[in-house]
Amino acid sequence: MVGHEVGRETFLDGQIRARQLRDQSENIVDRMKRCGLQGRPSRDAVSIIGLVSGQVERATDFCNCTGYPSSRATASTAY
């Protein structure tokens, strides 16, 4: 058997959390782009296909990076 059964509430909670993480990551990528930094790897798009549902969605594809605020950053300029 592949995977395990989860309740509707657990599934929906997971979907909400995944969406929040994607939105936060997109916000960071947008800010990096405005600063001239690359937030996504330069490769073709990757899609994920659900084994049972057949649902297709584009995989989140972000560069793995660590940012440190500038020592001159203020609350209004720091991200």
Image: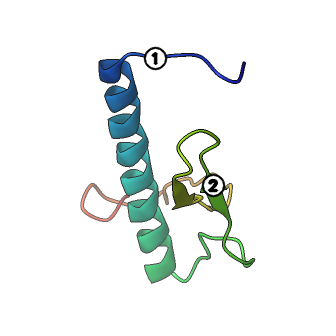
Nearer-the-camera pick, 24 or 78: 24
Task: Decide which of tag 2 and tag 1 comes sooner along the chain.
Answer: 1
Q: Foreground residue, 56 or 42?
A: 56
Q: Quadrant of the N terminus?
A: top right
User: What residue is at 46 percent from the left and 56 percent from the top?
Assistant: 25
Residue at image x 62%, y 53%?
49
The number of numbered badges drawn on the structure is 2
Give me the disc on residue 6: 1
Task: Tell me if 4 is positioned left or right of 30 in this view.
Answer: right
Residue 44 at x, y percent in the picture: 72, 78
Asked whether the beta carbons under mark 2 and mark 1 sit within 8 Å of each other, the answer is no
Disc 2 from disc 1: Cα separation:
20 Å
SS for dot 1: loop
Observer-nearest of 44 and 4: 4
Is residue 66 toward the left or the right of residue 18 in the image? Answer: right
- Identify which residue is drawn at 55% across, 83% down: 36
Where is 27 relative to 42, above or below?
above
Q: Quadrant of the C terminus?
A: bottom left
Q: Which residue is mark 2?
A: 48
Residue type, label 2: Ile
Q: Is the residue marked by circle 2 packed among few (<14), some (14-19), or many (20+) residues within 10 Å? A: few
Q: Is residue 22 visible?
A: yes
